[in-house]
Amino acid sequence: MNLFLLIAGSLSALAALAHLGCIVFGAPWYRFFGAGEHMAMLAEQGKLSPSLITFFIAFVLSVWSLYAFSAAGLFKQLPFIRFVLVVVTAIYLFRGIAGLYLMTNPLGRSEMFWLWSSIICLLIGGFHFIGLKQQWLVLSVKY
């Protein structure tokens, strides 16, 4: 078992659950997690778009979690595991770095949202990076 990938997968799963919580609990959760006032207002109005967008994000995070768990050795390796984990790691790290730059132009979100979400993304990306590096030779290159 690879502890770093277990942690990475768990954090992605937790993020997916937080997104699902936004769908279930609505505008207060959208506001708390910094989705922006526009998303919160749409949720309050009963619009479908916030739920669809948030569900898509939760789904993607869940898939990323499964890939991390697979690479950690919890179950059979999923297809394209090396490629997917390289892309996931890059996305987390890029999002973390980009978010720090967006603090100066927050695009409808608070500076604190960009700071904390960037730290979280960098942390998850770091766990992915270390775990992937440790497992690289073990992961199948079969497609």
Image (cartoon, grey):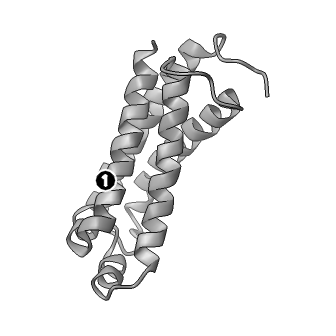
Q: Secondary structure at mark 1?
A: helix
Q: Which residue is mark 1?
A: 18
**Please, is residue 118 above or below residue 88 in the view?**
below
Q: Position of residue 22 (x, y in %)?
A: 30, 64
> Which amino acid type is marked by label 1?
Ala
Residue at (35% x, 57% y) in the render: 19
The extreme right residue here reads 143
Q: Is residue 138 left or right of residue 131?
A: right
Instruction: Compare residues 93 and 61 and report the one nearer the observer.
Output: 61
Q: Is residue 105 left or right of residue 37?
A: right
Residue at (71% x, 18% y) in the render: 140
Q: Position of residue 44 (x, y in %)?
A: 27, 84
Residue at (52% x, 40% y) in the render: 64
Q: Position of residue 134 (x, y in %)?
A: 54, 13
Query: How many residues crowd mark 1 within 10 Å: few (<14), some (14–19), many (20+)?
Result: some
Q: Quadrant of the C terminus?
A: top right
Quarter of the rendering containing residue 9: top left
Quarter of the rendering containing residue 139: top right
Q: Quadrant of the N terminus?
A: top left
Residue at (64% x, 29% y) in the render: 78
**Please, is residue 98 above or below residue 140 in the view?**
below
